[in-house]
Amino acid sequence: MPPVSCATQPKNGPGAMDDTSKTLRRWLTFAGCVLVVVVLYWAQTVVVPIALAILLTFVLTPPVTWLERWIGRIPAVLAMVTLVRRS
């Protein structure tokens, strides 16, 4: 009887568990990605304004800091908000 090579061994040995866990891991990764996309799509009415607010914070911090030297923090913030709202 010829020796059996690894490539022709039946799939119900120890190698079958590796294939099953790899397949399961791929499906779980795919399902996780789909879940993230669905949650982000569902929450876009909240996420988009928050992201824009964070972006505006980073963009407007230098002018507000510059204006703070002469007119104070609250007037500087109000001046920048007024300028942004009029644009």
Image (tube, rainbow, N blue to C red):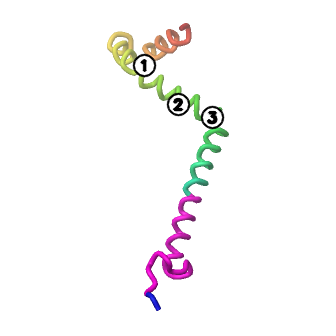
Would residue 46 be found to the left or right of residue 53 on screen?
Answer: right
Residue 5 within the segment the image draws in magenta? yes
Nearer-the-camera pick, 23 or 65: 23
Q: Which residue is drawn at 65% across and 32% down?
A: 45
Q: How far from the left and from the top, in percent, is residue 40?
A: 61, 40
Q: What element carries label 3?
A: helix
The residue stretch that appears in magenta: 3-28
Residue lying at the far front in this picture: please name it: 1
Q: Mark 2 points at which residue?
A: 51
Q: Name the residue beneath numbered marker 1.
A: 60
Earlier in the chain: of badge 2 and badge 1, it is 2
Give the residue number, with chain letter if any, for mark 3.
44
Reply above or below: 19 against 42. below
Which one is nearer the viewer's eye here, 44 or 69?
44
The amino acid type found where label 1 is placed reads: Leu
In the image, 15 versus 9, the foreground residue is: 9
